[in-house]
Image (cartoon, rainbow, N blue to C red):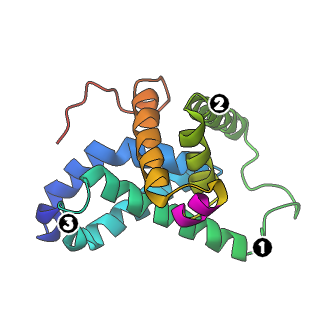
Amino acid sequence: MKRIASGEEAAVGELYDRFGALVFQSARQVLNSRAEADDAVQEVFVRLWKTADRFDPERAKLVTWVMLICRRHLIDRLRRRGARPDMGAGEGPALDQSPAAGVRESLEDAEVLRIRDRISELPDLQREVIERAYLQGFTLREVARQLDAPLGTIKSALSRGLARLRERLVDSDLPGAPRSDQGEA
């Protein structure tokens, strides 16, 4: 992050190589389409680049920082979407009616189902925290109140759950996910 803050472009690429798949999987869990997830990943990495000077390795691990920025961005995106009416729903034919679009949507739906299956395999607290924080858009404080648990417990459950989920997703056959044999930067 220091290298990114100093303007080193190669460092941004290394950060993306290291965490791009994790950010994409998180975005894909929350957003409706692969295109939206791709856009969100780009926006998250722009945010990381712009806030690189704020990262403090004494306060958090790099993966925690990246996922915090990712989570905040996804929540902001969902809230913005909720504030605007859905202009495309039921107002005439969709823009892309090609057979390839149907195949692409089927593949995306299959990916979402596989991700949801992986989430359902997590221990109850980890699953519940991830679903409420990422899929329902609650803050961790709200999740702590809802589950009547200390905030630290919720944060730990989220961290452990995301780590388990990342391991399971990176090792799975999800299209676009890097293989686990890629080296870390």
Which kind of residue does numbered mark 2 sit on?
A: Ala
Q: Earlier in the sequence, mark 3 or mark 1?
A: 3
Which kind of residue does numbered mark 3 sit on?
A: Asp
The front one of 90 and 58 is 58
Mark 2, residue position? 110
State which quarter of the image contains the C terminus: top left
Which kind of residue does numbered mark 1 sit on?
A: Pro
Q: What is the C-alpha distance between the residues marked 1 and 2?
A: 27 Å
The verdict on residue 141 being magenta is: yes
Image x and y of residue 37, in percent = 53, 52
| Placement of 110 over or under 94, stated as above or below | above
Q: Please give the range of residues in magenta.
A: 140-145
Mark 3 touches mark 2? (CB < 8 Å)? no
Left or right of residue 74: residue 45: left
Q: Which mark is residue 56?
A: 3
Mark 1, residue position? 85
